[in-house]
Amino acid sequence: MDEKVKLSAREFAVTAAALGAGVLYGIRDPFFGLDSGGIAMARQTAEESLAKRGLLSMEFDGSVTPSPELAQAVGVCAACRRYTVLDGVDRGAELPHACLYEAGDYSVQLVQTGDDMELTPGGGDYIGEQLETVLADGGTAEQEGFLTYGVLAAVQGLPADKGLEKL
């Protein structure tokens, strides 16, 4: 997969759940404040949106299958072994939330502004550009306090209907 993928936060979470993710590291809960009925409606809306764009196929039995391209991009995020999160403020303006996920030989950069997410296979360069800006201003990423790292033993997968409950 070489192209960027644009998703809403809920589309991202629904796809990850369909792939069996139990936990999404570095991602804010897009279903916060919804009861189980609200989550079910939001899930259906996200699935229909993805299906209209050809990124997900919906079966008569209610199961869903992400396209191979979408499954690869979101799958790296959902099954990552290492991740880096960037959150910060530059000259009073909040920077977009960014995560870099690595799983095996694959990496995906996720940049989130509001509800919109852009996934870039191969890592992209947003996080690196932001770090260069900080370092050029004479600081370090640790001093600025907006970079966190995580190393995971594994992300335990759950069936899609259980994965969404955990999100």
Image: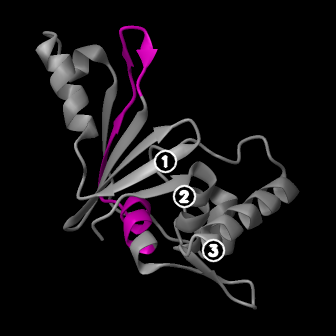
Where residue 146 appears, as percent x and y from the top left, is 34, 24
Residue 117 image label: 1
Query: Mark 3 and mark 1: span between their CA atoms?
Result: 17 Å
Mark 3 residue type? Ala
Amino acid type at mark 1: Met
Figure check: 82 above or below 43: above
Instruction: Name the N-terminal-most of marks 3 and 1.
Output: 3
Q: Is residue 58 left or right of residue 158?
A: right
- Residue 153 at x, y percent in the picture: 32, 60
Q: Secondary structure at mark 2?
A: helix
What colour scheme does the image use? one colour
Of pointers 1 and 2, the one earlier in the residue sequence: 2
Of labels 1 and 2, the one closer to you: 1
Residue with the mark numbered 2: 12
Q: Nearer the viewer, mark 3 or mark 2?
A: 3
In the image, residue 74 lies in the stretch drawn in magenta? yes
Residue range corresponding to the magenta coloring: 71-95
What is the x, y in percent for residue 53? 58, 70
On screen, residue 9 above or below 68? above
Residue contact at pointers 3 and 2, CB within 8 angstroms: no
Q: Work out how far the residue at label 1 is from the one at label 2, CA to CA, in angstroms.
A: 8 Å
Q: CA distance from mark 3 to mark 2?
A: 13 Å
Q: Which mark is residue 51?
A: 3
